[in-house]
Amino acid sequence: MKKFMMLATALVFSAAVTFAQDTKENAKETARQAGRTVDAAGDKIGRETRKAGRKIDRAAKNTKEDVKDGTNKALDKADRKMKKAERKMDNSR
């Protein structure tokens, strides 16, 4: 009977150890998955940041070109008005 109790105790102990090892491996795998998830999130943030940066660069470039075009149009209009005024002055003499 004593041997049977020892055997039963050993069996329960080995089952507990096996369960603990499984739990430990599951915890390790969960930690690895969490690490991969964090890495993937960091990569996505980096991609989105670069994408936003490119959009800002394009918007700044477009704004610069729009200002340049507007200035050129204003100068051209002023030049046309000056030429018209000069013609009127020449015609009135």
Image (cartoon, helix red, strand yellow):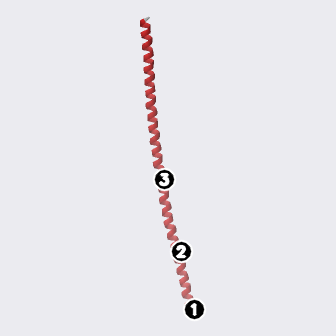
Mark number for residue 68? none
Q: Residue at x 52, y 80 (%)?
A: 79
Total tally of numbered discs in the picture: 3
Q: Identify the secondary structure beneath mark 2.
A: helix
Q: Give the residue drawn at x 46%, y 29%.
A: 26
Which structural element holds mark 3? helix
Contact? badges 2 and 3 (CB < 8 Å): no
Pointer 1: what residue? 91
- Distance between mark 3 and mark 1 Cα atoms: 60 Å
Q: Amino acid at mark 2?
A: Lys
> Considering depth in this image, is 70 or 23 the residue closer to the camera?
23
Task: Specify whether 63 is left or right of 6.
Answer: right
Vertical side of 22 occupied by 92: above or below: below
In depth, the one of 3 and 33 nearer the eye is 3
Residue that sits furthest to the top in the current view: 1
Q: Residue at x 52, y 70 (%)?
A: 69
Q: What residue would you read off at disc 3?
A: 51
Question: Is 24 left, or right, of 93 in this rendering?
Answer: left
Residue that label 2 marks: 73
